[in-house]
Image: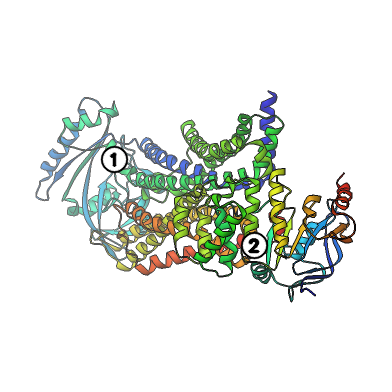
Amino acid sequence: MGAGRLVVGLAWRNVRHRPWQALLLLLALSVATTTITLTMALVDVSGRSWERVSQSTNGFHVGAGAEISPDMSPAQLERVRAELARLGDAPGVVAVGGPWRQAQVDAEIHGVPLRLRVQVRDPGSAAVDQPLVTAGHWLDDREGVVLEDGFAAAASLQPGDTITIAGQRVAVRGAALTVSLGPYPTDQPAWVWISAATAARLGTALDEGGYELDLRLADPDQAESFAAAHPEVGDTWQESKSEAVADIEDLAAVFGILAVFVVVLTIGTAVILVAGRMAAQIRQVGTLKAVGVTPGQVTCVLLVEYLAVALLATAVGLAVGGLLTPPLARVTRVLSVYGAQTPPITWPRAATAFAATTAVVVLATVRPALRGVRRSTLRSLASNTRPPHRPGRLSHAITRLPLPLPVWLGLRGANRRRGRFLANTLGLTVGITLLITAVALRTGVDTLRQKGLPPYEPDPISLAASIANQARASSLGFTVAALLIALALINATVAAVFAAHDHARNHAIMRTVGATPAQTVTAFLVAQLTSCLLACGLGIPLGIAFYESSIRGGVLDPIGLSALTYVATILAALALYALISAIPARLLARRPITPQLAYE
Amino acid sequence: MSAVVVRAEGLRRHFRGDGEPVRAVDGVDLVVEQGEAVSIMGPSGCGKSTLLHLLGGLERPDAGTLIVGDQRVDRLSEASWARLRRRTIGFVFQAFHLVDQLTAIENVELPALLVGTSRRAARRRATELLERLGVADRAGHLPDRLSGGQLQRVALGRALINEPLLVLADEPTGNLDSQATGEILQLFAELRDTHQTLVLVTHDPRVAATAERLLSMRDGTIVEDTRLDGGLPRQTLLAQLAGWEA
């Protein structure tokens, strides 16, 4: 009990002693848990939204159809309808909606000619697939049309407006949605529901089409076997749900990749922060050991400190991820239609987020912590820094190169802490990857706007809707990329500041033997820019690959960035990182030499 | 008459803390001639290390003038001091202060490379120095793998590689065991015999005895300036001075 209190007490004092470092770690871990939460919640919320709408509309389990032709007599049409309706008597069917007459007709909206799919509905409530009204009201005995919700939004139509269907002007009564009909513009032509009175006015325009029958089964899981047994059945609720959540699953897959990036970035940040803190705490570790605290207890102190931050980050990530899910989910037409809600926090989601942050913390902490506690107590008390032991082959190779002195010193400096160099490079690589992705996305959207009509977009409204969807997705992409680039910048700043402090003593020594501050700053910049250059080499192909995988199946073209763009990206990244690195290095180079040597 | 290597007049350096300012160096006048070996002794906190740092440009004086060689240096910029140090001044520190990512020989050749000596020439000169100092077999090792005595020999090699006008040594044996101290003392005696201008700060009377002139400091000022090769026997005087340590 006493030892536990000691460990917790020391961990708390460590956090209070360097609060901004703990805050940076908290920030990095929180972004990681937020992304993980978003990824899991998006998949979950899409399915739940579909189910919510399905329940509200007495959603179908199977849908069947029958075609008709203009030359059919009324008696023949009735026969086709009756034959389809008999499917409602099949074993396992508990509720029937329809059959409903439907057809594809010419229409005109705001002077734009386009095709519409109309379905003739009764004024009353259907036992199966009664659309959920989102604006205005449902059809009644009068003439009128209710628009599919996505189409109403894309065409900017509201109750009270009029549209022209098959040459007849019809008043818009409302907008509604259902799971049996696909949302616009994903599903085209757009769907509308008309009253029987309107259908009578349209006359022969509906002659070419068919009937639709929606059924609910006693056992929804039998939908596929029911469809197999009845050839007139076209859709099952499983297929409908799968198509509806396909968009969001793509989005979740992209977020999955982003989550990997964030975790890599967070590990990079955590490694640098923890290593930097360990360097600052070595003397304290020595003191603790000198007064009788065991190496195991010292490791526990460090783990408790970082696990507490991880726990807090999990809570932040779950809360922020939950709040961000609905607006992000609305990016896709599907979820806009089905109405995303804040998902409840579930134990599996919380456990996964905590496990991820714990893994990051343990990975980042254990090695430096164990190395710190294994160091002899006397050496720990004598020095805060951990000097390298062997020059290594790379150092020998660098020495043989005919390089200017500051460059040579810089490369040797980069080789001094290989773990931190690698962590920094990985963090910068993620930043460059996202930068390339964001630039490619911007270029892709601009090209799409300039290029205009893809061949499969039949009218300006659907094109506008598709572009609007793409723009929303792009905005999301830019937002997320900007957030992660910001995180990469935080990571880069942390890395630069800690590296500058780590190199400060050696640079002070170099100054005692005649190196100017400019030479030490140059050496430091060479060390830092080496990792940035390596990150550019890795990040550009990764960015291209990530963009290509993100747009698969979409309307955007493959990446088409010019060589100049890549060169500009590399130069911008190098310039920015040089600026970030130069500030702490110059500040330290301006300090008097003696206090920096006295640190030892 | 020998040329003057260091001339300080009214040199002052005060440190401001929470309370009264600490008068680390408080109006020091000092002349060091070429080929002279000067020891500075005094109780802890008397300002002797600060004076040495002022002479080498590691600290800036608040007041006074300082001339090294024929150049007034008390108002030099950091970069100008660095350029002056690389050619004119060699430092030896108590804590050795070697660049931990460079091997022993790379540490020694660093000042030579900074003045523009070719890689090949710098390596040849560094190798000669390490052989002379008895640590040639440790040339390829990083400082973390060297003993205290070896580290100080490497530091001495680094201080000497550009044949500086002035060598400044701050407690050069402070971190060494008795055997290593003896070896370093021998090296300093050899330096004195080659008429290398040397100013060293020490608590150790044996180290001070390697010089020919002893400056005693108290409260930031030089209170006594004694020639060790005349008057009282060197060891007797040093035994008295050692009483400060009690």
Q: Is residue A115 above or below residue B67?
A: above
Residue located 47% across and 59% down the image: A399
Which chain contains the residue that carries disc 2?
B
In this view of the protein, can residue A138 be seen by the observer? no
Mark 2 Cα within 10 Å, few/some/many (few <14, many 20+)? many
Which disc is residue B160 wearing?
2
* Gap in angstroms between the C-alphas marked 1 and 2: 84 Å
Residue located 55% across and 56% down the image: B105
Which disc is residue A240 wearing?
1
Report x, y in % for residue B98.
62, 54
Residue located 43% across and 39% down the image: A40
Report x, y in % for residue B168.
72, 61
In this view of the protein, can residue A343 be seen by the observer? yes
Q: Report the residue that reaches farthest toward the top.
A: A1
Q: Quadrant of the N terminus of chain B?
A: bottom right
Mark 1 Cα within 10 Å, few/some/many (few <14, many 20+)? some
Q: Is residue B166 above or below residue B236?
A: below
Quarter occupied by residue A559: bottom left
Residue located 69% across and 66% down the image: B89
Q: Is residue A560 above or below residue A203?
A: below
Q: Is residue B39 above or below residue A336?
A: below
Which chain contains the residue that carries disc 1?
A
Report x, y in % for residue A563.
35, 67
